[in-house]
Image (tube, rainbow, N blue to C red):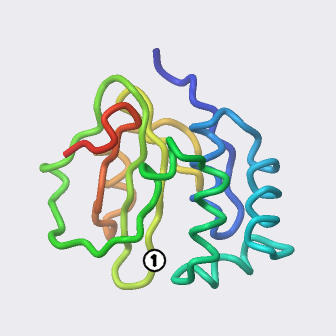
Amino acid sequence: MRGELNVERQGRNECMLATIAALQGRPLSQVRAEACRAAQVDKWNEAIQLCAHDAYWRAVERVAGPDLYPIVCCRYAATMVPTAGEWAIPNSGRGVIVVTFFPLTSHIMPWENGLIYDPMDPHPVTLEDWLRGNPTATILAVRSIKEKTHV
């Protein structure tokens, strides 16, 4: 089935929270409030400034929970950067795709049944279409909830 994933449009720097909310089937506002409490900040933008700090990742771990956290946790350095042809979004299941816009930022998005739902513009698209619209993006990881990793 396509299109069952409910992805809300993210606020500034909320791709992680929007992805977690979508994959858990929870409202983004609820996940945002829980994450802000865990990070001890009033607004998530304050927490994102702590991204390299453990407080940010503890808040993400708290809202993601033990099953989803290993899927969304992106605290790693890419040892190789694959080309788009080396990645595929599975035609069934759910997971995340992590991309970077070197050297400035990274972005995480949920996928379901072969389609990506970018929290910046949450209508379903194929990986090829998303990459065509974001030519400076480089894929860092595609992860499946079921298998924990997918390459």
- In the rendered image, the vertical position of residue 150 relative to residue 36, given as above or below: above
Mark 1 Cα within 10 Å, few/some/many (few <14, many 20+)? few
Amino acid at the residue labelled 1: Thr
47 sits to left or right of 77:
right
**Frontmost residue, 91 versus 52:** 52
Taking the spot 41% from the left edge, 36% from the top edge, the residue there is 145
Number of marks present in the image shown: 1
| Horizontal and vertical percent position of residue 93 | 39, 26
31 sits to left or right of 53:
right
Where is mark 1, residue-wise?
A: 105
Taking the spot 79% from the left edge, 56% from the top edge, the residue there is 34
Taking the spot 15% from the left edge, 69% from the top edge, the residue there is 80
**Frontmost residue, 122 versus 91:** 91
- In the rendered image, the vertical position of residue 143 relative to residue 84, given as above or below: above
- In the rendered image, the vertical position of residue 135 relative to residue 118, given as above or below: below
Find numbered disc 1 in the image and state the secondary structure of the residue it sits on. Answer: strand
Q: Outermost residue toward the front? A: 66
Taking the spot 44% from the left edge, 39% from the top edge, the residue there is 111
146 sits to left or right of 52:
left
- In the rendered image, the vertical position of residue 63 relative to residue 50, given as above or below: above
Q: Outermost residue toward the top? A: 1
| Horizontal and vertical percent position of residue 33 | 82, 57
10 sits to left or right of 108:
right
| Horizontal and vertical percent position of residue 20 | 60, 47
* Res 95 → quadrant: top left
* Res 77 → quadrant: bottom left
| Horizontal and vertical percent position of residue 48 | 64, 77
